Image: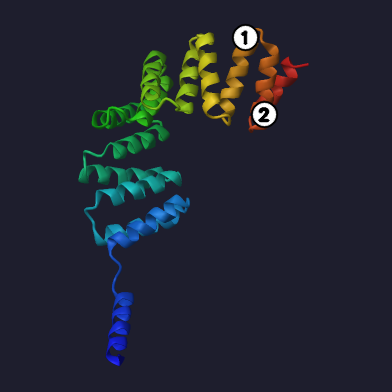
Amino acid sequence: MKYILITFLALVLLTACSPRNYKYHSRQAAVKFQKQDYSGAITEWTKVIEKKSNYATAYKRRGIAYYELNDYQNALLDLNQAIILNKYDSESFKYRGDIQMKLDKLKEAIQDYNQAITLNNEYANAYNNRGICKAKLKDHAGAVNDYNRAILYKPDYAVAYQNRANARFRVKAYREALEDYNKALNYNSNLPEAYFNRALINITLKQNQDACRDWAKAEELGVPKAGDYRKRYCK
């Protein structure tokens, strides 16, 4: 009995002293990322990379954590390395596209979204974000086509409805835009931009009460200029 106890204690001590492998740190990184402890996740993914330097997922996940901290340069370095190690991961291309868009490199972002979609032709987020880039480049028809695809593959995608409404609003397709804002807010009632822009359409269509109600909601959700519009148009 004494021998068994000593053996058990020796095993416990050996386990405690053994170096932790990359899988342990991967799990810790995932937990910290889920808790929005992005710096902690970066620390854990760095330990993973130290133990397994050719692990594409570690670079990708660390890059995404850097992205969440708005550290786009380090995020880009990691996503580049992730793609070198695995050129078939659509998520790596999508996030690199997101970084390029944040850096205002819209054409480069579109190229990355193209590749993400080539690898996963039902990637709703990639279609939506490519649409945002096209809208910024004044290609509103192309943007609407991308938002259509995003909604096709993710029918409750509130932000895609909002973005399609924005594109239609800019080309004065007010009725279609209004319908899209309604759908966006039906799926997500906390979209201040949708309330503000729907109010602009309603005021254009002489639906002043609806406009004033939307500006009040937009102001409540943190859009200060909505209050200025209420003072101007709402009595």
Callout 2: few (<14), some (14-19), or many (20+) C-alpha neighbours within 10 Å?
some
Q: Amino acid at mark 1?
A: Thr
Q: Is residue 97 above or below residue 151?
A: below
In the rendered structure, which disc, 1 or 2, sits on the residue that comes first in sequence?
1
How far apart marks 1 and 2 lie (CA) works out to 19 Å
The quadrant holding residue 2 is bottom left
Q: Quadrant of residue 132?
A: top left
Say which quadrant the N terminus sits in: bottom left
The residue that mark 2 highlights is 219
Q: Crowding at label 1, few (<14), some or many (≥20) Cα neighbours within 10 Å?
A: few
Residue 96 screen position, x and y as percent: 33, 38
Q: Is residue 67 above or below residue 40?
A: above
Q: Is residue 124 above or below residue 206?
A: below
SS category of the residue bearing label 2 = helix
Q: Which residue is mark 1?
A: 204
> Of the residues shown, which amino acid type is indicated by label 2?
Glu
Q: Nearer the viewer, residue 132 or 212?
A: 212
Residue in front for this viewpoint, 91 or 122: 122
Q: Residue furthest front?
A: 1
Q: Disc 1, disc 2: CB below 8 Å?
A: no
Identity of the residue drawn at 23% across and 56% down? 53
Along the horizontal axis of the image, is 175 left or right of 127? right
Residue nearest the viewer, comparing 155 with 92:
155
Of residues 12 and 171, the one drawn nearer to the viewer in this rendering = 12
Quarter of the image that includes the C terminus: top right
Image position of 164 (left or right of 107): right
